[in-house]
Image (spheres, rainbow, N blue to C red):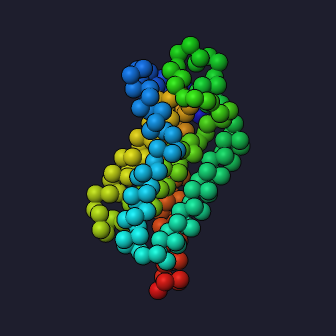
Amino acid sequence: MIEELLKYDEQLFLFLNGLGNTSWDGFWNVVTHKLSSIPLYAMLLYLVYKKFGVKGTLIVMVVAAFMITATDQLANLFKYGIARPRPCRVESLQTTIRFVAERCGRFGYFSAHAASSMAAAVFIGLLLKSRYKYLPFLLLFWAVVIGYSRIYLGVHYPLDVITGMFFGAIFGFLVFLLNRWAQRKFIG
């Protein structure tokens, strides 16, 4: 059953990865680059500051740093524990895939990019939904775009991305609850 699931995952990867063309490669390389999200994070930090003030924003920043570190480390634990090679490392796929990324790590299950972007989307979306009702949907769309970029570039299978998003959503929700507790405890 696992072998069959992995085969479907590979076929879906080949389809989605094959949708790309050279005119879009630069765009997807920019989308996936971690520094590209800094303007978005700066805007979100400003919105958090408007809602929570200085002390509350500091708490949000601390729990967000914990969240990103936790998702990243859990992804590494899975990557090296499961040791599923990234598609760009699979010899039988070398002539078939479009490898667009600048580099290719060893293992890919699951995507830390997908996990951290989904965690941030859920966490910040829940934090700010009372003031900006469409923001959670925009952030979820952003997280999905980040996830797809990993497939487009040839460095992750769809299952890597979906699993990353799943764990990211859980972490984002749990950290939202942690933040709520910390805001009450330290600010009142």
Compared across the picture, whether 91 is left or right of 31 comes to right
Q: Could one spot residue 75 in this view of the protein?
A: yes
Vertical side of 3 occupied by 38: above or below: below
Residue 71, image x, y percentages = 59, 53
Residue located farthest toward the top when viewing the structure as drawn: 95
Q: Position of residue 132 (x, y in %)?
A: 29, 63
Query: What x and y, as percent, mark residue 131?
Result: 30, 68
Q: Residue at x 61, y 39 (%)?
A: 109
Q: Depth check: 52 or 112 in front?
A: 52
Give the quarter of the image for residue 112: top right
7 sits left or right of 48 in the view: right
The foreground one among 73 and 48 is 48
Place residue 125 in its image quadrant: bottom left
- Residue at figure coordinates x 53%, y 15% from the top left: 96
Q: How many marks?
A: 0
Q: Position of residue 83 (x, y in %)?
A: 69, 36
On the rendered image, what quadrant is the N terminus found in?
top right
Which quadrant of the figure has residue 16? Answer: top left
The residue under the point 33% across, 53% down is 137
